[in-house]
Amino acid sequence: MSLDQRTRVVTQISAAVACNALAALRLAVSEAPQVGLNPAEIKEIITLARDIQQQPIAHVAHLTDQLLREPKKTPHEHSADCGCGNHHA
């Protein structure tokens, strides 16, 4: 697959934002005007990449909450050694 220069720079900006790679972002944004990207387009690319970057964080937080939630007790027959503390003396 061969990418044109403009697409390559857009991809570099997006990837740099997603990874918080500031040196790579500086380089890609510096190169952007040379391939025909104007400041408004660069800002739009960065905004889109930041929006996408936030989605996985929200999903990870939600999954973590689910995984760490106390499990619901399943109904069972009570006995003196079941350990649930809800059996009769």
Image (cartoon, helix red, strand yellow):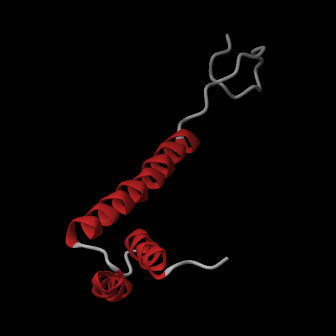
Q: Position of residue 5 (x, y in %)?
A: 46, 82
- Quarter of the picture holding the N terminus: bottom right
Quarter of the view holding residue 44:
bottom left
Residue closer to the observer: 63 or 86? 63
* x and y, in percent, of residue 8 in the image: 48, 78
Looking at the image, which residue is at 43% across and 77% down? Answer: 6
Residue ranking furthest to the left: 39
Q: Residue at x 77, y 17 (%)?
A: 79
Nearer to me, 64 or 10? 10
The image quadrant where one finds the C terminus is top right
From what the image shows, is residue 75 above or below residue 81? above
Looking at the image, residue 4 lies above or below residue 71: below
Using the image as rendered, state which of residue 9 and residue 53 is in the foreground: 9
Q: Looking at the picture, how far across and down is residue 50, in whole percent?
A: 34, 61
Q: What residue appears at the point 41 percent right and 59 percent down from the top-left corner?
A: 53
Viewer-closest of 51 and 40:
40
Whether residue 39 sits left or right of residue 63 in the image: it is left
**Residue at position x 28%, y 87% in the image:** 30
- Vertical side of 77 occupied by 27: above or below: below
Q: How many marks?
A: 0
**Left or right side of 58 for 50:** left
Q: Is residue 78 left or right of residue 72?
A: right
Within the image, what quadrant is residue 66 found in?
Answer: top right
